[in-house]
Image: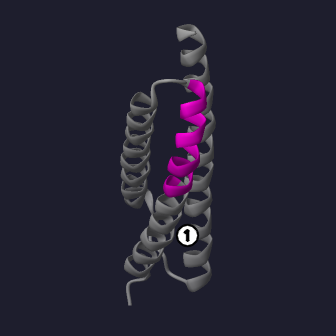
Amino acid sequence: MNLNLIGYCIYLIITGIIILKVGKICYQNGNIFVAALIPNHKEIGTQTNQILLLGYYLLNLGYCAMTLVSWQVITTYSQLIELIASKTATIILVIALMHYINIITITKFIKKLI
């Protein structure tokens, strides 16, 4: 039995769910945030939020797929769990970092416009 294939499937399912769920939450709450930053321009705010969501999905899903290349050969179930946990934790940290970078960037950009 190849534990790497099992690990890939579990990892992609877990990270896919996390990425989609966090993206949906950030998009819904981001509409309110961007609308407050860009008053009287609701369409621009909505489109900006959609572009941020698309970039978020592409970057995170691409990163998840690329991390599969760096996996070592998995020989035990405990090694499988450790690797999935560490790779998933890395994705969660990347998502959090991206969120804060986006908030800081948007805030600075809007302040320049005002």
Q: Quadrant of residue 13?
A: bottom left
**Depicted 60 relative to depicted 44: above or below:** below
The percent position of residue 76, horizontal first and vertical second, equals 55, 83
Left or right: residue 66 compared with residue 24: left
- Image check: 89 left or right of 10? right
Residue at 50% x, 53% y is: 23
Prevailing secondary structure class for the magenta stretch in the rendered image: helix
- The image shows residue 65 at horizontal and vertical percentages of 36, 57
Q: Residue shown at 55%/77% (left/top)? A: 80
Q: Is residue 16 magenta?
A: no
The amino acid type of the residue labelled 1 equals Ile
Q: Quadrant of the N terminus?
A: bottom left
Which coloring applies here? one colour
Q: Is residue 24 above or below residue 84?
A: above
Of 74 and 40, nearer the camera is 40
Of the pair 100 and 65, the residue shown nearer to us: 100
Depth check, front residue: 105 or 94 = 105
Q: Is residue 102 above or below residue 66?
A: above
Front residue (pair 56, 49): 49
Q: Circle 1 — which element?
A: helix
In the image, which residues are magenta?
23-37
The residue indicated by pointer 1 is 84
Query: Residue sitting at 58 percent across and 40 percent down?
Result: 32
Whether residue 46 sits left or right of residue 79 in the image: it is left
Q: Is residue 25 magenta?
A: yes
Residue 70 in the image: x percent, y percent?
Answer: 43, 56
Q: Quadrant of residue 53?
A: top left
